Image (cartoon, helix red, strand yellow):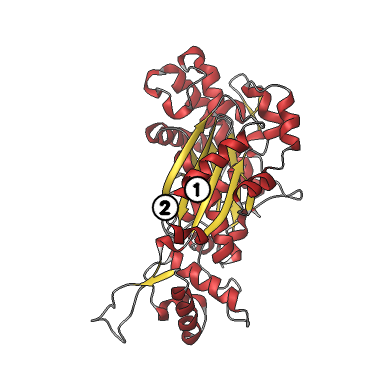
């Protein structure tokens, strides 16, 4: 298959992914639900063609899924060639997931339905993530979200995903946390304690992995199967995906692209975090950005030349990281998202495109850039989606951050 064909193939195209019938009904059911999720309105015949399963097998699986409350049938479509077709859809209330993002200055907790739509959310603010209080605060927020579900829907809650920075133990001091917090976090078994509080299984994810997964799910078709994803917050959360699977390296940790060394305006090498994160913008702005305000409350329009300077240095840093990453692991697309308001994000992407075009790379093609779709809730949404997809959908896609 040519690289161009591969680039355009939807990440959730299950053809050729080993999902044909092999006597494993559960695998077949996952394949069918995956197609319904990402091609809503397909008929029995279209699902059969997409998965490679026999129409009779698909019919039996659909009957079971309908009885379980996972799918619903639309109005019969008549007037088309052949037999009338009935479109199949996932039921929004067929399953729910809870997603948690633990950030340096905030925690996001939300409830997601089977249509990947946020039903409700709570946002917690703090000076730093305190290991002595974070579990109680999260437990209270999760209990409030669960209370909004009807009694019959409690059984359809597909557990909890928690996304947090990969540098939690080493980055706390940058946000004014007392020295003992690193030791407290090292001793904290977050998954076990949260499971004990809620009775639900808990998956721990990296923020970059979760945000990238959410981007795949919410991207308009054809969804990219190979790309680099950057999320600009107080740090840079980044992940590289190929074939719907994240590259984790030999130690199981995601690629920490924010630590890649780049040159600043003086030619000094700096980690990309120090030039392109929102912490670097706050450092440039000084008192113009009060320390107690979260990034979504910053008055970007009032930053003037400071914002211009940051965009230039951030774009240069991102361009270098994007290009160097793609020389090692080919990807034709880089997606940038973050806590920035849309006009600032799009401006940053435009300047980064110019910086990429200006690199001395000869005839080698540079990746194209795109903007993310989810902003502040990306990591929490991805964290909520992972438990749902691991339970109901094809593992070829659900293991993105396993």
The answer to whether residue 239 is left or right of residue 219 is right
Q: Name the element at disc 1.
A: helix
Disc marking residue 117: 2
Q: Nearer the N terminus, badge 1 or badge 2?
A: 2
The answer to whether residue 263 is left or right of residue 142 is right
Name the one closer to the observer, 347 or 205.
Answer: 205
User: Residue 165 falls in which quadrant of the image?
Assistant: top right
Residue at screen point 57% across, 58% down: 244
Q: Is residue 63 above or below residue 140?
A: below
Q: Name the element at disc 2.
A: loop
Q: From where the camera sits, is residue 102 visible?
A: no
Question: Residues at badges 1 and 2 in contact (C-beta under 8 Å)?
Answer: no
| Direction front: furthest residue | 151
- Picture coordinates of residue 150 (x, y %)? 42, 56
Name the one closer to the observer, 258 or 26.
Answer: 26
Q: Which residue in the protein does label 1 denote?
A: 381
- Picture coordinates of residue 187 (x, y %)? 76, 37
Q: Is residue 401 above or below residue 358?
A: below
- Between marks 1 and 2, how big is the CA–CA gap? 9 Å
Picture quarter with the N terminus: bottom right
- Picture coordinates of residue 247 (x, y %)? 66, 52
Mark 2 Cα within 10 Å, few/some/many (few <14, many 20+)? some
Query: Disc count in the image?
Result: 2
Q: Is residue 384 above or below residue 340?
A: below
| Direction left: furthest residue | 79
């Amino acid at each position: 298959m040519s690289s161009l064909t591969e680039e355009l193939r939807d990440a959730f195209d299950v053809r050729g992914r080993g999902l044909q019938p092999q006597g494993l009904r559960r695998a077949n059911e996952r394949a069918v639900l995956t197609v319904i999720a990402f091609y809503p309105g397909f008929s029995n015949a279209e699902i059969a063609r997409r998965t490679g399963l026999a129409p009779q097998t698909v019919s039996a699986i659909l009957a079971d899924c309908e009885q379980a409350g996972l799918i619903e049938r639309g109005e019969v479509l008549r007037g088309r060639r052949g037999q009338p077709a009935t479109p199949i859809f996932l039921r929004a209330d067929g399953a729910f997931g809870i997603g948690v993002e633990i950030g340096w200055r905030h925690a996001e907790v939300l409830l997601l339905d089977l249509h990947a739509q946020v039903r409700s959310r709570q946002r917690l603010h703090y000076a730093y993530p305190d290991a002595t209080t974070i579990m109680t605060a999260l437990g209270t927020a999760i209990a409030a979200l669960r209370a909004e579900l009807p009694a019959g829907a409690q059984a359809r809650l597909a557990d909890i995903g928690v996304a947090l920075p990969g540098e939690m133990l080493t980055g706390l001091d940058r946000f004014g946390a007392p020295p003992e917090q690193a030791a407290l976090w090292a001793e904290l078994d977050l998954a076990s304690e949260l499971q004990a509080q809620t009775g639900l299984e808990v998956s721990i994810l990296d923020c970059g992995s979760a945000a990238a997964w959410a981007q795949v799910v919410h991207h308009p078709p054809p969804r990219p199967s190979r790309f680099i994803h950057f999320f600009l917050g107080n740090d840079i959360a980044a992940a590289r995906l190929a074939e719907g699977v994240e590259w984790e390296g030999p130690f199981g940790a995601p690629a920490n692209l924010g630590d890649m060394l780049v040159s600043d305006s003086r030619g000094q090498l700096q980690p990309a975090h120090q030039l392109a994160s929102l912490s670097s913008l706050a450092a440039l702005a000084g008192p113009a950005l009060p320390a107690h305000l979260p990034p979504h409350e910053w008055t970007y329009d009032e930053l003037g030349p400071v914002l211009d300077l940051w965009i230039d240095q951030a774009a240069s840093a991102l361009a270098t990281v994007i290009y160097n990453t793609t020389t090692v692991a080919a990807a034709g697309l880089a997606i940038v998202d973050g806590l920035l308001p849309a006009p600032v994000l799009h401006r940053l992407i435009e300047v980064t495109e110019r910086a990429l075009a200006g690199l001395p790379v000869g005839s080698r093609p540079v990746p194209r850039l795109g903007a993310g779709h989810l902003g502040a809730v990306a990591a929490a949404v991805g964290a909520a989606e992972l438990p749902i997809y691991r339970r109901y959908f094809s593992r070829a896609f659900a293991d993105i951050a396993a």
